[in-house]
Amino acid sequence: MVCWLISYDVFDARLALILLLTTLWAIRLTHNWARGWQGLEHVDWRYVDLRTKTGLFFPIVDFLGIQMLPTVLVFIGCLPFWLLASQTGSTPNSAAMLIPADLIWLIIGFSALWLEFRADNVLRAFSQNPDNAQQVLDYDVWSWCRHPNYLGEIGFWLALAIAGYIGSGSLYAWAGFVAMVILFIGISIPMIDKRQLGNKSKYAAYHERVPSLIPRMTRAKE
C-alpha cells in the first residue's frame, strides 16, 4: 500500500486516509490480542467446541473454516484497496480528489475504531474482576447492543467499502462488507449468544432487553 502511495505523481488523499484507518485498526487488533494472550497452550473456546462437535472431521473443518475462510474474507474485504490503487494508476487526477461524500466513510470508520477500542477496554476491565464471573456486562457501550465490538468491526469494513465505491464506482467494493455482515450475523453472534445463554443465567434477560447489533433509539424498560 505504501508503494502505491509513492509510485504515482499525484498524491491520493483517499488512499492515504484509508491506509491510516486500516493501520490504526491493525494496531488496535494486535494490541488487544497481545495483552490478553495466555500462552501457546491456550486454545480459543470456539475451536474447542468445533473439535468436540466435528470429531474426526475437525482437520477438514479447521483447514476450511478456521484457516481458509477468514483469509478469504479479509482478502475480499481488502478489494477496495486494489480498486482505489487501480483508479489512481489509470486516472490519477480524478482518483486523488476527495469529495464531500468521503466524509461519510471517514466518520463511520473512525467512529467504528473508537467503538471497538472502547468495547475492548470495558470488557477487559470487567473480565479481570473475579466477582464478575457470573455477571453480565450490560453497561457503557455494552448497554447499547450486545456486541458493540462486532458493530465496530462491521463499521470498519463498511467504511472501506464506501471509500472503495466512491473512488472506483465498482460494486465489487461492497463484497467484503457483505461477507463480513453474513459472518458476524450468521456465525459469530449466534455462537457467542448460545454460549452466554448456557453459562450465565442473567444473560437471558440481557439478551431479551438489549438488541444484538443496532442500538435502539429509545432505552428499553428494565
Image (cartoon, rainbow, N blue to C red):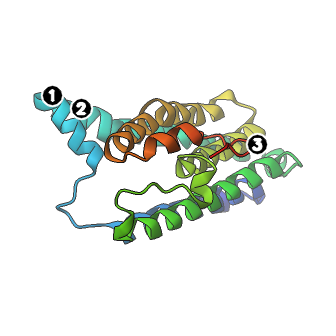
Pick the quarter of the image with the N terminus.
bottom right
Q: Residue at x 80, y 48 (%)?
A: 104
Q: Nearer the viewer, residue 209 or 82?
A: 209
Labelled disc at residue 217? 3
Q: Residue at x 24, y 36 (%)?
A: 63
- The answer to whether 102 is drawn above or below residue 60 in the figure is below
Measured as percent of width and height from the top left, residue 26 is found at: 51, 61
Residue 10 image-quadrant placement: bottom right
Q: Residue at x 30, y 40 (%)?
A: 66
Cα–Cα span, label 2 and label 3: 40 Å
Is residue 94 shown to the viewer in this render? yes
Q: Residue furthest left?
A: 56
Labelled disc at residue 6? none
Amino acid type, callout 2: Val
Q: How packed is label 2: few (under 14 Cα within 10 Å), some, or many (20 or more)?
A: some
Labelled disc at residue 61? 2
Tag 3 secondary structure? loop
Tag 2 secondary structure? helix
Amino acid type, callout 1: Phe
Q: Which residue is mark 1?
A: 57
Q: Residue furthest right?
A: 100
Q: Nearer the viewer, residue 214 or 84?
A: 214
Answer with mark 1 or mark 3, whichever residue precedes in sequence. Answer: 1
Total labels: the figure holds: 3
Q: Nearer the viewer, residue 24 or 131?
A: 131
Q: Residue at x 60, y 51 (%)?
A: 152
Tag 1 secondary structure? helix
Depth check, mark 1 against mark 3: the one in front is: 3
Q: How packed is label 1: few (under 14 Cα within 10 Å), some, or many (20 or more)?
A: few
Q: Please report contact status of discs 1 and 3: CB closer than 8 Å, yes or no.
A: no
Measured as percent of width and height from the top left, residue 4 is found at: 62, 55
